[in-house]
Image (cartoon, coloured by chain):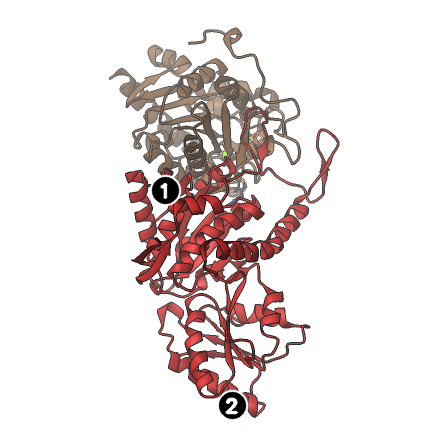
Chain colours: A brown, B red
């Protein structure tokens, strides 16, 4: 395990001038993902903010080979890369499919599920900004209860987000992890580890998004930390069915106490229309999931 | 010694694919294509075909797999039809837009709703404008020969090729077929040279967002905009006309069989009445033409092998002497007429060929297309021509209901 930032690969794979917004959580995460996976990586990209981050033809800010896929296709596109690399005898390459929450939870779920069921030898990472940001913050299957989006503008989202970790667990894949760009060393370590495992590896990244969530661009790391701190977004690993809490989440579990989500919620404009009942519902949802994770981690 | 086997169209397709040695396959079952997916599974599991076979969860994924694999430098194959082909629609555009030489068999079948598992050509017709080359086969021999040629054409012009043949009529019917030798196919088909690379030494992002206008790259070179890329795809398909004809010619020289290139003809030298169509229905019209000749009608057939690119020059030339043209087709553009009839009329416009074109919609959802019905339609139209009653109109063959 890397215990400090000085052990992280120094090389940069994203050059200055990417097309992402100021303070984009995805940009921070992507920077550390590529540092962890290094040169021999091919990225498959669905339409999303990541596609825009890569730049507009004929320039790109990213210096690893990448292929764009259709929105529903990223799991299949990665499967095609894996198959071709095998057929062409290039075993040294890592295939990374990096999709937004829309490209994972919603339109991309079929091809991801198919690829995972085939235990395709690749990393699928979902960067979760909890809405369709590229098209202007519409609701997705990952948007939390009570959030305003441009398709839940008046009443806010009425449903909880899907528990995608459990969906991926049901595929019995060798490695599942959650990470946050607010904890870049933990993120880096988990990608380094995932890179050494064979089969389908699923990594879920919480990527705060200033324009979509409604907070100042300087606060991305703070918001990311609070998501972990309030257990909205626990850090974990599941290897061969065994769940572990990691980093800050592990310490929180040991302490047996966590702050309420209100501290996280009130900093974001997307929750401005949230009712007290919704806040309580969301808190109850967080508590239930957290208790379950703590129990499983202790088993 | 030639290797002649009595096999179905689907087996012919699977054998041809095996001879072309694709490196990545992906397919999803759908009647009447399924046997190809099954046979290729068997061949790869037995090691007869050394390829990665991705057993995908949908047709959309099948083509997505091939798009990525072809971009990474692998020769690829898939097969589908009907609703499976429709489900691929987004990716058909993506494959052509990426200029990937993917080869696919489309075992033509009617599309739902309502469900029909039987043959017509509405599936491929509805994908006409996706930028794929579409070649139609007359019989099982042509399936083998066309699949092999398809790889050469696709890899020459960097445009994907759909090899279309009629479900059940060919896919499930046994016919004697000569199977070429692997060595001979290798001699005819050079290895695949990909146009892009996914190489860490030369990193690039493939198919990013394009602006409407042209933009300079980091070296100051002005690069294509979206519209230039589209024009290049169109030019690729235009260039494919020559390549399809030339590939057919060279194949004929090497293997002794000629599928005709863009079109094939039957007794057209002096023909005044010309029937035309695609695939097995066109092959059947040759019997009708022969019978009409016995009645003293100077009848002939022009078969359209390449529907896209549409061989307008070759068609105008072959139909130069026609006084009446009849298009028999198993598809239509609802609210207008059969697609082949529309395309043909547009192709003949301004060429001096001004024979009326009668469209005949036939065989939808597997409805019988009988020679007798063809002859009746032909005779009526010829009568109409004499009495000046025959304009550009559309008939429905062997179909009940209101006019
Ligand atoms: C088939 C299809 N439907 C819709 C779109 C439009 N579209 C492009 S990106 C996007 C949203 C992406 O959301 P997500 O996956 O969460 O990534 P994000 O933009 O949030 O990074 C949508 C709806 C598309 N490109 N393709
Ligand atoms: S909208 Fe959000 S996720 Fe997208 S680039 Fe901007 S900050 Fe990043
Ligand atoms: Mg999103």
Quarter of the image where one finds residue A245? top left
Which is more toward the observer, B195 or A193? Answer: B195
Chain letter of disc 1?
B
In the rendered image, the vertical position of residue A178 relative to residue B60, given as above or below: above
Label 2 is found on which chain of the structure?
B
Question: Foreground: A218 or B238?
Answer: B238
* Residue topped by disc 2: B383
- How many angstroms separate mark 1 from mark 2 (CA)? 54 Å
The residue at the far bottom in this view is: B387
Using the rendered image of the protein, determine whether residue A69 is visible from the camera's viewpoint. Answer: yes
1 or 2: tag closer to the N-terminus: 1
Q: Do discs 1 and 2 share a chain?
A: yes
The answer to whether any part of residue B127 appears in the image is no
At 32% from the left edge and 24% from the top edge, which residue is drawn?
A174
Q: Name the residue under label 1.
A: B56
Quarter of the image for residue B371 reads: bottom left
């Amino acid at each position: 395990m890397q215990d400090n930032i000085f052990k992280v690969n120094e090389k940069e794979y994203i050059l200055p001038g990417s097309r992402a917004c100021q303070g984009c959580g995805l940009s921070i995460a992507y920077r550390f993902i590529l540092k962890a996976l290094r040169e021999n990586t091919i990225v498959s990209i669905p339409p999303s903010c990541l596609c825009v981050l890569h730049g507009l033809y004929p320039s790109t800010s990213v210096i690893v080979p990448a292929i764009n896929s259709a929105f529903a296709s990223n799991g299949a596109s990665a499967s095609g890369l894996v198959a071709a690399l095998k057929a062409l005898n290039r075993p040294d390459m890592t295939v990374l499919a990096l999709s937004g929450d829309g490209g994972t939870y919603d339109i991309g779920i079929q091809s991801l599920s198919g690829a995972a069921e085939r235990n395709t030898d690749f990393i699928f990472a979902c960067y979760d900004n909890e809405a369709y940001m590229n098209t202007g913050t519409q609701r997705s299957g990952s948007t939390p209860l009570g959030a305003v989006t441009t398709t839940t503008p008046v009443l806010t989202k009425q449903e909880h987000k899907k528990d995608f970790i459990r969906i991926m667990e049901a595929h019995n894949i060798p490695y599942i992890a959650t990470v946050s760009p607010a904890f870049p060393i933990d993120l880096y370590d988990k990608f380094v580890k995932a890179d050494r495992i064979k089969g389908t590896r699923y990594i879920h990244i919480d990527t705060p998004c200033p324009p979509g969530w409604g907070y100042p661009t300087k606060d991305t790391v703070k918001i990311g930390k609070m998501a972990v701190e309030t257990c909205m977004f626990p850090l974990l690993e599941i290897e061969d069915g065994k769940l572990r809490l990691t980093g800050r989440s592990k310490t929180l579990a040991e302490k047996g106490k966590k702050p309420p989500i209100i501290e996280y919620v009130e900093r974001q404009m997307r929750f401005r229309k949230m009712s007290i009942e919704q806040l309580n519902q969301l808190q109850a949802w967080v508590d239930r999931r957290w208790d379950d994770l703590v129990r499983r981690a202790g088993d | 010694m030639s290797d002649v086997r009595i096999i179905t169209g689907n087996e012919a397709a699977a054998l041809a694919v095996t001879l072309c040695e694709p490196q990545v396959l992906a397919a999803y079952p759908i009647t009447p294509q399924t046997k190809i997916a099954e046979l290729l599974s068997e061949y790869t599991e037995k090691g007869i075909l050394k390829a990665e076979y991705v057993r995908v969860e949908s047709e959309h994924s099948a083509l997505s797999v091939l798009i990525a694999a072809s971009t990474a430098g692998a020769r690829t194959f898939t097969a589908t039809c009907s609703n499976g082909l429709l489900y691929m629609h987004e990716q058909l555009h993506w494959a052509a837009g990426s200029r990937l030489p993917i080869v696919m068999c489309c075992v033509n079948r009617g599309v739902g709703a309502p469900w029909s598992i039987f043959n017509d050509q509405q599936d491929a017709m509805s994908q006409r404008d996706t930028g794929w080359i579409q070649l139609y086969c007359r019989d099982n021999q042509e399936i083998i020969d066309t699949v092999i040629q398809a790889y050469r054409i696709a890899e020459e012009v960097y445009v994907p090729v759909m090899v279309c043949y009629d479900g059940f009529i060919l896919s499930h019917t046994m016919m004697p077929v000569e199977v070429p030798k692997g060595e001979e196919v290798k001699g005819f088909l050079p290895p695949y040279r990909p146009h892009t690379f996914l190489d860490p030494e030369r990193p690039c992002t493939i198919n990013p967002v394009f602006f409407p206008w042209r933009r300079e790259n980091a070296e100051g070179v002005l690069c294509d905009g979206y519209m230039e890329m589209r024009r290049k795809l169109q030019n690729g398909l235009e260039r494919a006309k020559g390549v399809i004809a030339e590939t057919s010619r060279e194949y004929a020289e090497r293997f002794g069989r000629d599928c005709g290139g863009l079109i094939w003809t039957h007794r057209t030298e002096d023909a005044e009445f010309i029937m035309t169509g695609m695939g097995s229905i066109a092959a059947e019209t040759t019997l009708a033409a022969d019978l009409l000749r016995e009645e003293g009608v100077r009848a002939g057939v022009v078969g359209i092998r390449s529907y896209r690119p549409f061989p307008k020059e070759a068609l105008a030339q072959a139909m130069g002497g026609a006084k009446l043209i009849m298009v028999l087709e198993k598809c239509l553009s609802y609210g207008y007429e059969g697609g082949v009839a529309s395309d043909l009329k547009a192709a003949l416009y301004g060429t001096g060929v001004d024979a009326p074109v009668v469209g005949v919609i036939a065989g939808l959802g597997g409805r019988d297309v009988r020679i007798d019905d063809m002859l009746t339609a032909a005779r009526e139209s010829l009568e109409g021509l004499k009495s000046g009653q025959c304009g550009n109109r559309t008939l429905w063959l062997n179909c009940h209901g209101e006019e």
